[in-house]
């Protein structure tokens, strides 16, 4: 039963699996013998065996009556894998074309929104929060102002590809961090010189002292709120994303006030200093 299940797992149907197993056991056989041994209905046995031949599992002798022989499993399975792989690759290319076409077509759909429209979503689990963060950088059209939780440092490398893509699209990012975030320096240096240069094109960083705020404003219309765990300030309980232009406008003003008081952080300088320090320690 396990052998039959494994053959079905790779793409053979139940009759094909039992017929192939019978031929491996019987050797060269006629359809009627396979029919009895594999318990394949007589009206279907030729169709099943021809299908196996087409998939590379069986060879057919064009005699009267026809005879069938199972191909060595290693050869048959390798051939089947390569064939399916090529089929999947073709399907992926076709799907990719449809996706790109759909993207272009859906951009023309007119969006009607009321000025007072408010909508919100919440992420609670770690995977949902990560998905939230990626979606923010994927959907942003103009700008992101963000004050992340101080302990959010480990998330930064995970978001790096999406942040760089956003910057490449011309997105401007203002990142305001607490002094505790200075340990961002080794992570910046680990990203490599080119990545740091790309970040500098679209991201400004400032350090602000004694700020307990944790929020973000996206495109001056969407607010991101980080809710800390009541019993553990080093854990995020949830993240809420709110589409509210009025709320976003008010938080943007608060952000700018804090931003004006912040200490400018040069990413390249910090990354270079950390690299030099690390080199000195290793020596």
Image (cartoon, rainbow, N blue to C red):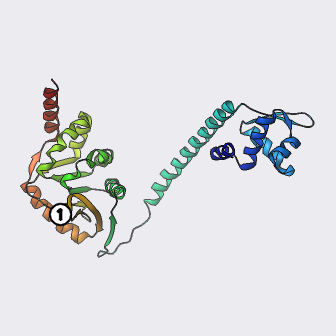
Displayed quadrant of residue 67: top right
Considering every residue shown, the one lying at the far right of the view is 64
Identify the residue shown where x is 6% and y is 55%.
Answer: 261
Nearest the eye: 169 or 139: 139
Nearest the eye: 234 or 3: 3
Nearest the eye: 145 or 172: 145
Label count reads 1
**Can residue 182 be seen at all in this image of the molecule?**
yes
Q: Which residue is mark 1?
A: 252
**Can residue 168 be seen at all in this image of the molecule?**
no
Displayed quadrant of residue 242: bottom left
**Residue 32 appears at what percent x and percent y?**
88, 43
Considering every residue shown, the one lying at the far front of the view is 1
Secondary structure at numbered mark 1: helix
The answer to whether residue 245 is left or right of residue 180 is right
Considering every residue shown, the one lying at the far top of the view is 283
Identify the residue shown where x is 22% and y is 67%.
Answer: 248
Identify the residue shown where x is 9% and y is 61%.
Answer: 257
**Residue 129 appears at what percent x and percent y?**
32, 58
Quarter of the figure with the C terminus: top left
Q: Is residue 66 above or below residue 104?
A: above
**Residue 90 appears at what percent x and percent y?**
58, 42
Q: Is residue 66 above or below residue 102?
A: above
Q: Give neighbour class at mark 1: few <14, some 14-19, many 20+ (Cα, 10 Å).
A: many
Displayed quadrant of residue 232: bottom left
**Residue 170 appears at what percent x and percent y?**
28, 49
């Amino acid at each position: 039963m396990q052998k039959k299940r494994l053959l079905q797992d790779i793409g053979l149907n139940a009759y094909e699996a039992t017929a192939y197993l019978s031929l491996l056991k019987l050797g060269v056989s006629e359809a009627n013998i396979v029919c009895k041994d594999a318990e394949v209905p007589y009206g279907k046995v030729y169709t099943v065996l021809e299908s196996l031949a087409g998939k590379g599992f069986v060879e057919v002798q064009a005699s009267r009556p026809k005879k069938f022989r199972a191909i060595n499993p290693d050869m048959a399975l390798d051939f089947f894998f390569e064939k399916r792989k090529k089929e999947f690759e073709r399907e992926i290319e076709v799907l990719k074309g449809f996706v790109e076409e759909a993207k272009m077509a859906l951009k023309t759909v007119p969006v009607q929104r009321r000025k007072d429209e408010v909508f919100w979503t919440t992420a609670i689990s770690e995977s949902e929060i990560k998905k939230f963060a990626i979606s923010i950088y994927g959907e942003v059209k103009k700008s992101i102002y963000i004050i992340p939780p101080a302990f959010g440092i480990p998330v930064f490398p995970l978001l790096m590809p999406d942040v760089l893509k956003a910057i490449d699209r011309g997105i401007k990012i203002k990142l305001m961090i607490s002094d505790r975030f200075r340990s961002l320096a080794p992570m910046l240096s680990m990203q490599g010189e080119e990545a740091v240069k790309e970040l500098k094109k679209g991201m400004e960083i400032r350090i602000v002292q004694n700020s307990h705020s944790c929020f973000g404003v996206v495109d001056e219309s969407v607010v991101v709120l980080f809710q800390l765990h009541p019993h553990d300030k080093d854990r995020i309980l949830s993240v809420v994303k709110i589409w509210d232009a009025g709320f976003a406008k008010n938080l943007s003003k608060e952000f700018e006030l804090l931003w004006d008081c912040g200490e400018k952080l040069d990413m390249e300088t910090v990354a270079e200093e950390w690299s030099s320090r690390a080199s000195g320690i290793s020596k």
